[in-house]
Image (cartoon, helix red, strand yellow):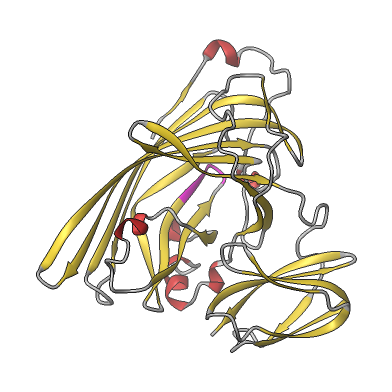
Amino acid sequence: MKRTLLFTALLSSISLFGQTIITSTDFIEAGDSVGVSTTNDFSIDYAATASDTVWDFSNLEDNTQLFEIAYDISTAGTVIGFQFGQYAPPKFQASFYQPFDGLPLDQLGGILPINIESINRLSKVEEDKVSYVGYSMKVNGQGVGFRSDTIEVAYLLPLSYGDIDTSRGYTNMDLNPIFDAQIIQYRQRISKVDGEGQLTTPYGTYNVLRVHHSIKETDSIRVALGPINQWIPINRTINEYEWWDKGLKRPVLKVETEGVFGNDNPTRITYLNNQIANIKKNTIEVAIYPNPTSGFVTLKSIEQIETINVYSIDGKTIQTKSPNSKEINLDLTHLPSGIYTLHTVTKNGQSFNPIVIK
């Protein structure tokens, strides 16, 4: 891994907006939840960048709103906890896990005669870097985890204008003995802090660093179906454009693209919104029982509960209630088994609590 400097002459100049430096304290932590909007406006000019750039994306329109949640490893189950929790080798002790849709399983369509769901990426935040230490998923309902053979460093910290970092990651996901199949992910990353300046979205104006991750993936999937047992190559070029400000736990704006026939085509745009603005997480105590549950759960608070939101693991709202009571019984028996988040809001605060439905 190398760190060099870009644009030496520019680095010696004074930024109009002041110098922004991103450190480990600016990243999401286990238990954090961040309000995010998505948009379908893929026509924005996300490529333009330099020192003292002004990006005006104030006209973006929300398509959906959700929460990005960093889940504590203790909620991931016994197997994943053993592989990535406090008793794992230090380099694999993850800080949290989050849903991840970047594995190319959709390329297989309906070929796999197994059910793969709840795919997560496990991240480790340290003072000098943020890295991806492995993946977890459910295969036919059974939770399995895969430590990365080569750990990919996503950010070498601190981040400042002009930095260039390179890294690579290799993960061999062997689904045996559940099913005779294998997924190999190999990623080569170049990350450039190629811009700084001022960014405006519909929710505010920020002093930001712009980070461009260029990722080349050479993946392959092996599937054994009767006499057929062959490797299927899947090569991709992924770009991620991120605008970071201090203390916000994720990029203010993130544009994800994938290269197709030489073109850089946007696939997703997300940006911070003001959901539950100015209310700190876990400022209220909520008793939730039983947990795990078969579907019926009770919540108690010393304060009047104004709103309860139930979020799926990918942050989408699937149920909302306004009980205006200190105690409420929830019927979640209609939901599939898995991990959900109960978001409880009172006049004076809020709390995000994971719950497991058996």
Assign the magenta stretch its main secondary structure. Answer: strand
Image: 131 above or below 71:
above
Looking at the image, how many numbered discs can be counted on the residues?
A: 0
Residue at 52% over, 15% down: 7
Image: 51 above or below 91:
above
Quadrant (top left, top right, bottom left, bottom right) of the N terminus: top left
Provide residue 237's location: percent of width, then percent of height. Answer: 36, 39
Residue positioned most to the left: 227
Tell which of 355 and 295 is nearer to you.
Answer: 295
Provide residue 191's location: percent of width, then percent of height. Answer: 46, 33
Magenta stretch: give its range.
Answer: 127-131
Provide residue 176's location: percent of width, then percent of height. Answer: 25, 72
Residue positioned most to the top: 9
350 left or right of 254? right
Residue at 76% over, 54% down: 275
Q: Is residue 261 magenta?
A: no
Q: Quadrant of residue 292?
A: bottom right
62 left or right of 182? right
Provide residue 76's location: percent of width, then percent of height. Answer: 51, 72
Image: 332 above or below 311:
below
Residue at 64% over, 83% down: 332
Tell which of 38 and 288 is nearer to you.
Answer: 38
